[in-house]
Image (cartoon, grey):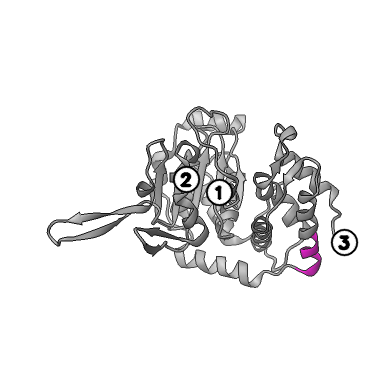
Amino acid sequence: MPIEITDPLTQKVIVSLAPYLQGKEQALKLALLAFFSRGHLLIEDLPGLGKTRLAVALAKALGLTFGRVQCTSDLLPSDITGLSVYNKSTGIFEFHQGPIFNNIVLVDEINRTTPKTQSALLEAMAEEQVTIEGKTYKLPEPFFIIATQNPIEQFGTFALPDSQLDRFIMRISIGYPSRDFEKDILRGGSRRDRIESIKPIIGKEDSLEIQRNIRGNTTISERMLDYISDIIHATRNNKFIKAGLSTRGALALSYIAKTSAYFQGRDYVIPEDLRVLAPFTIAHRLLLKEEYKELDTKEITQSLLQQVPIPL
């Protein structure tokens, strides 16, 4: 089902970035939904399909600072969070911020770094702060992590634990562009160098205001709360699933539904907000039974949604 966005300001962002992100409109819409829901995004896809370009373009259009972490097996937690360096002239240790102290942070190939380094992101994602050498530092607002990983190449990788996967409000893929879009790319060449010229469409304060409006002014009726509860319990009572949706996952679904409603000019949630976006919000949180490990959690989610009655 297509993702509808009619909000004029958000639509302006999509239109302005279209020339730089050929064939990636759906991924851009999902990234905007994740950002304005105040969550974090996991992009699981093959190399060379525009994950980095999407992250940089989004930061430019929203007028936000951008940081990048290229994950490797020898990456240290301090390479992400920063560290204290001794200053000889002052005789004191000075804290030097790491790339995590940006509004939008791209964590590229997150599963190529060790679990210890991966865990350095958990506090940042959950609390929007980091604790270094016993001192806590608040991260800038808004704060949004886009992590990427290759779903096929597993040599030298460290699988993300379920507790960390649960911190991502959505998991998406970009996929190959259509034949026509790919011909346009081949005809015009890479436009990556032109991304730096993108002008902000929405400022930082505008983004924060939109986030506050979505959380505070978009309502979920009792009928919709019952519908969400039915979906949640369907994941917990399925023969293929060992562990269903957590309470954090249920909240994520409600936040995404609210943002979807806002993007379509409504201040209330309807079933379509949930049905369209649930596969991106639920599938990566499901833990399958050992004998069903090979099944696709996204297909299971779609099947569950068809079984749960839609409120009239």
Q: Which one is earlier in the sequence, the residue at label 1 or at label 3? A: 1
SS at mark 2 in the image: helix
Of residues 195 and 83, which is closer to you in this image?
A: 83
Amino acid type at image mark 3 = Leu
Counting from the top left corner in percent of width and height, residue 183 is at 55, 29
Residue at disc 3, secondary structure: loop
| Residue at image point 69% right, 51% down | 277
Judge whether residue 194 can be spotted in this image.
yes
- Residue on which disc 3 sits: 312
Residue 265 highlighted magenta (yes or no): no
Q: Please give the label number shown on residue 118.
A: 2
- Residue range of the region highlighted in magenta in the rendering: 221-227
Label 2, label 1: how many angstroms apart (C-alpha)? 8 Å
Q: Work out whether 208 lies above or below 64.
A: below
Q: Residue at x 40, y 56 (%)?
A: 102
Q: Secondary structure at mark 1?
A: helix
Amino acid type assigned to the residue bearing label 2 in the image:
Gln
- Label whose residue precedes the other's in the sequence (2 or 3): 2
Mark 2 and 1 residues: CB-CB less than 8 Å, in contact? yes
Residue at coordinates 35% horizontally, 47% vertically from top-left? 79
Mark 3 crowd level (few <14, some 14–19, many ≥20, 10 Å Cα): few
Q: Quadrant of the C terminus?
A: bottom right
Labelled disc at residue 164: 1
**Tag 1: amino acid:** Gln
Find residue 187 and report its horizontal and vertical position in percent: 49, 29
Query: Where 92 sits versus 169, above or below?
Result: below
Q: Is residue 90 left or right of residue 63?
A: left
C-beta proximity under 8 Å, tags 2 and 3: no
Horizontal and vertical percent for residue 283? 68, 45
